[in-house]
């Protein structure tokens, strides 16, 4: 006896007082016998005895009695799990029989009785295998036919044979819990755990972080600087003092970047490990060992264990199993959506394979484990995802090693490195020519020239870039967390901004993964709810053709009464949140939810109905009700309750084709309180059946509701002489001559926010494709509602269709058969088209053929996990964009625009089946609530709210990261260009740079790193999603950025040159090249830093600081201050940097290579004035750039007109 949501016993579903109409005795007798007439129980006993004898014989002859060899291998059982057919089960038994026969013959020792028992069992199994092989060629049989029942009985015995003879367990008592037995099974068939992926050590993460090209250059530069300064740079009698500080500062900068990057990765790595371990400790299952039911953790389950599964616990299957008989009441149904993407509950019979990773949603039963760990279906996927040591990849589906962002940054770093090296070599050569060749300095000056060239290289290399990128990504990932995006890999932030295609799973991603009533035909009115944000109940109540109150009352009473107590809605008692959860049969949950949408409470209706209430004042009349339970033979369920005037009202629901055939009249609208009916004419019946077909073609499951009034004294056991059940047995008279009440269409509905999210993806230039294991019509229905499929994708658009298929036309029939070629493919056809047979006979991926298909492909239905992987790989590797003729043809013929670069693929999903593709894609999204742990581990980003719309948020932040790094590069490289030119001019003129290396390091590392955080804190704007993704091959530095950088650098260089050459005469101080000739390191020098060079340093920094505000804009916007005061982080960093600069100049002294005592107010005014000058300079740059663009456009138009004139002019004769 079970309990309902109120804690009361489910007497309505288990009381002996209520009548139970189940399968007939004849059906049971057929179902539980094999085709040879032997009783299944006798077969069980025979197999059990034979198994014990075989184990005894083999144990006596085995070298180690505790390790008796099994007649099959783990590969044999893994093959059975993969094939999942009864023929595969027969083949496993056949292979085992061969081995058993060999063991028996080698073990005969004169005991005639035991071998005879074994021979008899072998004979039965041999006949069983022969029958199963013969049936494989004839299946499928009609439901409930004698052939189907005989085949089911054979499969049940085969499952018992597999358990007893092959796996040496027992369907009743399970395994012997002896540790030696369990260890033997682990050694033979493996453990139910995947070898953990070895975690990267902190040192390894540091090593990976230091592979950055810029960091390598900085390390080399730092070491050379220290070596030169402390050895050859110090002459005899001199002391080094702090000469090493510049090189050490460079190495310190590298250390900071490496530690931050490695620390972030190390912290996240262990956070996921802790989460995984906590989940593993709570995953326990009930197994039968030595006849006792015990709980063990998933990792301790072994092959041969007998699991006890109960749908009330929503048990997740931890290993591949075979279901054992006999059936216990309601057939067990499995939710395989996490593994296959198919949202339909799959009924399982004894002998069927139950896959790991699936969930029992209805019924209960026992099953024997056949494959664990790496040998199970889910285990193979998990091993691939984790790249565990158990998995060897032999495919060619590996992706790129770097994200698009880091590929571009690596290119920029190499280009800067080359440019810096060239500049350093030029500086050295010119210094040698001028210093030694012209000014006749001694050869010892070569050391000074070498140090100068190293300074030039230090200026050219953007020391702050690696830290800037890390800070930008880390800041954005933190912000994305608040927007429900958990970023596991920092570079995933930006990669999503480059995404060109999203391949989305259906179940749990686009849809709610919850069966819901979405259509109803009642009282001659058809209501189909297509808007995801509107419920069917609301639509019915607000419709102009709303049914009368009497019709609505009858429907809600019918559903509330004729549903099982095990199906429960959990309602918020305060009424604020509505339905908070549910349990039980998903179809009944959908019906009860519809009742709630109509404003009724099914609990009140049940508890207020005599003969149905099991609590309250009416509970004592429960025995007056008559329940006729659902059976697969009848395909319907009924419940009769007494009427106040006497007699009964019988409510029925079931398969539409069965219930409609039993109806002779139909419900129509009538006055309140009057349930009007009319004859169900042939036309009316045809209309109902056509509607049912329409629902089915749109991917809905159909369910019919009916009722009839029965007089008192009616015999509920009476059988009809004319009407039969689905299996051919006589139907119950009480379930005939009924009144058709409604036809309900049920589906897994689209999430309300999805259509708008997909529309925003299209506006952002991101294509969306649906990849699902569901049926084609279901996939098409969801894809059309979501906006993935448009009207022009259908061949027949309806009457008066517009040319574009989007206006003036009728509604197209949203079914797979009506789609244009290659818009939808099923997995089987997809594999046939994109794979070819190689010279060695192996299947090879055909990229050329794939490129002919994918531009048209919008929906991939009935796909396998490998299909998703193939799609992600093929799109990623496609070079179709290079075929200009093909792209032109696609545009002209089908209006398909191919992105002009390699695709960047985002894959979304929540199930185990999605994991390999999530890992292969450039960016993988997993659902944080409904997603399996394997999917989360494979993904780059986890959507914490399971909301597809959050992907759009991720794309927006990703593009913002890209823009932030562009802003920083624009800022940083402006500094570098100006500084390199300044250093070169100093080398040419004075063989000395006016900007010391430590000053440039301050600008490049500390100030620029703070600037990167300031620019990264710029919030994303809606305009980011109004343009297409950035090409993989596009350089990060655009022409507009070059104009900004060169213009600002030219201004800074001009100012520095004026101060360098005209400063002493303008302001009356000593030239810096005289005061600092020996750099304060040699005996006899003044050991003073000049005001001249300090002024140049301060002015240069303030021009840089104010240009940071200009760098917030990349497109030449006039108002560079727009939004700046709404960003407190940017403002704070600007103030902090300004204060630090003031401190460095006034108190930095020898440490910062500035004049003792800093600068006077006069020189501060000069510095600030030149700094503020960067704002008008930016406006001049904007004007000149626009004039240049207009001029180029004018010249192009003039050229076109001139060519047209030459082409069209008359030619005289």
Image (cartoon, rainbow, N blue to C red):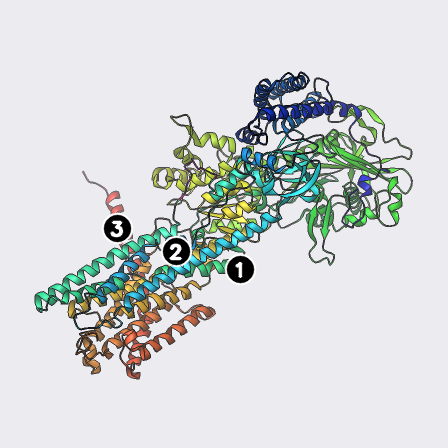
Disc 2 crowd rating (10 Å Cα; few below 14, some 14-19, many 20+) is many
How many numbered badges does the structure rendering display? 3
- Which badge, 1 or 3, is on the more N-terminal residue? 1
Residue 88 picture quarter: top right
Circle 3 residue: 1199
Circle 2 residue: 206
- Which badge, 2 or 1, is on the more N-terminal residue? 2
Residue 177 picture quarter: top right
Tag 1–tag 3 contact (CB < 8 Å): no
Question: At 17% from the left edge and 60% from the top edge, which residue is drawn?
Answer: 426
Image quarter hosting the N terminus: top right
Compared to residue 387, the image places residue 430 above or below, namely: below
Classify mark 3: helix, strand or loop. Answer: helix
Circle 1 residue: 482
Image quarter hosting the C terminus: top left
- In screen coordinates, is 1034 left or right of 663? left
Question: At 86% from the left edge and 31% from the top edge, which residue is drawn?
Answer: 716
Classify mark 1: helix, strand or loop. Answer: helix
Give the CA separation, mark 3 to mark 2: 57 Å
In-front residue for pair 853/295: 295
Q: Position of residue 105 (x, y in %)?
A: 59, 17
Q: Which mark is residue 493?
A: none
Q: Report the magenta residues as a range.
A: 390-399
Give the CA separation, mark 2 to mark 1: 28 Å
Q: Position of residue 726 (x, y in %)?
A: 73, 27
């Amino acid at each position: 006896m079970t309990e309902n949501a109120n804690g009361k016993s489910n007497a309505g579903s288990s009381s002996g007082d209520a009548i139970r109409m189940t399968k007939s005795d004849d059906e049971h007798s057929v179902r539980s016998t094999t085709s040879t007439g032997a009783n299944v129980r006798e077969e069980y006993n025979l197999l059990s005895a034979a198994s014990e004898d075989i184990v005894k014989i083999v144990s006596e002859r085995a070298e180690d009695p505790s390790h008796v060899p099994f007649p099959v291998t783990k590969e044999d059982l893994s093959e059975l799990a993969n094939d999942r057919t009864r023929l595969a089960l027969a083949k496993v038994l056949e292979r085992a029989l061969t081995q058993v026969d060999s063991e028996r013959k080698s073990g005969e020792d004169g005991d005639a009785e035991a071998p005879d028992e074994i021979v008899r069992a072998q004979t039965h199994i041999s006949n069983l295998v022969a029958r199963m092989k013969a049936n494989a060629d004839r299946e499928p049989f009609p439901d409930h036919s004698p052939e189907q029942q005989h085949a089911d009985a054979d499969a049940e015995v085969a499952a018992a044979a597999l358990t007893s003879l092959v796996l040496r367990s027992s369907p009743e008592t399970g395994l012997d819990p002896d540790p030696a037995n369990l260890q033997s099974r682990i050694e033979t068939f493996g453990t139910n755990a995947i070898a953990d992926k070895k975690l990267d050590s902190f040192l390894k993460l540091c090593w990976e972080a230091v592979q950055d090209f810029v960091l390598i250059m900085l390390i080399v530069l730092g070491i050379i600087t220290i070596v030169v300064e402390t050895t050859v740079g110090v002459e005899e009698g001199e002391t080094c003092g702090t000469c090493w500080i510049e090189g050490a500062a460079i190495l310190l900068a590298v250390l900071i970047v490496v530690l931050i990057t490695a620390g972030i990765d190390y912290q996240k790595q262990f956070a996921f490990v802790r989460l995984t371990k906590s989940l593993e400790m709570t995953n326990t299952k009930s197994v039968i060992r030595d006849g006792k039911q015990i709980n063990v953790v998933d990792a301790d389950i072994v092959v041969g264990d007998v699991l006890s599964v109960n749908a009330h616990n929503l048990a997740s299957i931890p290993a591949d199993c075979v279901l054992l008989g006999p059936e216990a009441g309601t057939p067990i149904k499995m939710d395989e959506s996490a593994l296959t993407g198919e949202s339909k509950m799959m009924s399982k019979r004894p002998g069927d394979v139950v896959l790991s990773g699936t969930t029992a949603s209805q019924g209960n039963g026992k099953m024997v484990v056949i494959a664990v760990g790496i040998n199970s279906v889910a285990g193979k996927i998990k091993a691939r995802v984790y790249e565990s040591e158990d998995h060897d990849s032999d495919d060619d589906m590996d992706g790129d090693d770097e994200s698009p962002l880091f590929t571009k940054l690596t290119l920029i770093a190499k280009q800067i490195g080359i440019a810096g090296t060239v500049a350093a070599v030029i500086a050295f050569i010119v210094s040698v020519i001028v210093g030694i060749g012209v000014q006749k300095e001694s050869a010892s000056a070569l050391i000074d020239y070498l140090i100068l060239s190293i300074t030039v290289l230090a200026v050219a290399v953007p020391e702050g870039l690696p830290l800037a990128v890390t800070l930008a990504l880390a800041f954005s990932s933190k912000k994305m967390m608040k927007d429900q995006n958990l970023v596991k890999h920092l570079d995933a932030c930006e990669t999503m901004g480059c995404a060109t295609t999203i391949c989305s799973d259906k179940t749990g991603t686009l849809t709610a993964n919850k069966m819901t009533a979405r259509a109803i035909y009642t009282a001659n009115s058809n209501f189909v709810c297509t808007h995801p944000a509107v419920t069917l109940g609301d639509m019915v109540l607000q419709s102009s053709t709303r049914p009368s109150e009497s019709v609505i009352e009858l429907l809600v009473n019918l559903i509330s009464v004729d549903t099982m107590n095990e199906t429960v809605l959990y309602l918020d008692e305060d009424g604020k949140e509505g339905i908070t959860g549910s349990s039980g049969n998903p179809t009944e949950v959908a019906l009860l939810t519809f009742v709630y949408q109509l404003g009724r409470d099914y609990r009140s209706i049940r508890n207020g109905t005599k003969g149905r209430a099991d609590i309250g004042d009416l509970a004592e009349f429960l025995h007056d009700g008559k329940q006729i339970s659902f059976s697969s033979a009848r395909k319907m369920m009924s419940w009769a309750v007494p009427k106040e005037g006497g007699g009964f009202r019988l409510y029925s629901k079931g398969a539409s084709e069965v219930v409609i055939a039993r109806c002779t009249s139909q419900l129509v609208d009538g006055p309140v309180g009057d349930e009007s009916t009319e004859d169900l004419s042939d036309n009316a019946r045809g209309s109902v059946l056509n509607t049912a077909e329409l629902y089915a073609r749109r991917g809905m499951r159909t369910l019919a509701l009916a009722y009839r009034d029965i007089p008192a004294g009616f015999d509920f056991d009476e059988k009809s002489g004319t009407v039969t059940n689905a299996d051919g047995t006589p139907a119950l008279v009480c379930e005939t001559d009924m009144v058709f009440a409604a036809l309900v269409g049920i589906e897994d509905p689209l999430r309300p926010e999805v259509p708008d999210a997909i529309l925003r993806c299209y506006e952002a230039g991101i294509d969306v494709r649906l990849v699902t294991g569901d049926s084609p019509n279901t996939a098409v229905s969801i894809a059309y509602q979501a906006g993935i499929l448009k009207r022009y994708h259908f061949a027949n658009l309806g009457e008066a269709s517009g040319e574009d298929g989007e206006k003036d036309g009728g509604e197209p029939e949203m079914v797979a058969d009506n789609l244009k070629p290659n818009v939808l493919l099923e997995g089987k056809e997809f594999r046939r088209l994109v794979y070819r047979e190689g010279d060695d006979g192996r299947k090879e991926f055909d990229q050329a053929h794939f490129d002919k298909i994918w531009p048209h492909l919008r929906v991939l239905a009935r796909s396998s996990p490998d299909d998703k992987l193939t799609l992600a790989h093929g799109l990623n590797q496609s070079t179709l964009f290079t075929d200009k003729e093909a792209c032109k043809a696609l545009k002209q013929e089908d209006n398909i625009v191919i992105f002009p670069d390699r695709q960047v693929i985002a894959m979304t999903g929540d199930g185990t089946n999605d994991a390999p593709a999530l890992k292969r894609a450039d960016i993988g999204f997993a659902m944080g609530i409904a997603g399996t742990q394997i999917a989360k581990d494979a993904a780059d980003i986890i959507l914490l709210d399971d909301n597809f719309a959050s992907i759009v948020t991720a794309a927006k932040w990703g593009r913002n990261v890209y823009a932030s790094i562009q802003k920083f590069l624009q800022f940083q490289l402006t500094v570098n260009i100006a500084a390199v030119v300044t250093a070169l001019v100093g080398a040419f003129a004075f063989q000395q740079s006016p900007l010391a290396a430590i000053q440039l390091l301050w600008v490049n590392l500390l100030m620029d790193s703070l600037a990167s955080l300031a620019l990264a804190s710029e919030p994303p704007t809606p305009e980011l999603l109004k343009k297409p993704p950035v090409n993989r091959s596009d350089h990060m530095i655009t022409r507009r950025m070059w104009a900004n950088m060169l213009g600002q650098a030219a201004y800074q260089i001009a100012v520095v040159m004026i101060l360098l050459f005209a400063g002493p005469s303008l302001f009356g101080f000593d030239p810096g090249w005289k005061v600092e000739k020996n750099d304060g390191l040699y005996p006899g020098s003044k050991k003073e830093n000049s005001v001249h060079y300090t002024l140049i340093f301060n002015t240069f920094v303030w021009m840089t600081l104010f240009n940071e505000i200009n760098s917030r804009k990349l497109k030449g916007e006039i108002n560079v201050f727009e939004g700046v005061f709404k960003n407190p982080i940017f403002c704070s960093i600007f103030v902090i940097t300004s204060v630090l600069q003031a401190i460095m100049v006034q108190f930095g002294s020898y440490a910062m290579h500035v004049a003792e005592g800093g600068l006077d107010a006069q020189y501060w005014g000069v510095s600030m004035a030149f700094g503020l000058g960067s704002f008008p300079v930016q406006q001049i740059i904007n004007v000149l750039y626009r004039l240049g663009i207009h001029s180029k456009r004018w010249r192009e138009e003039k050229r076109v007109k001139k060519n047209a004139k030459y082409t069209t002019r008359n030619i005289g004769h």
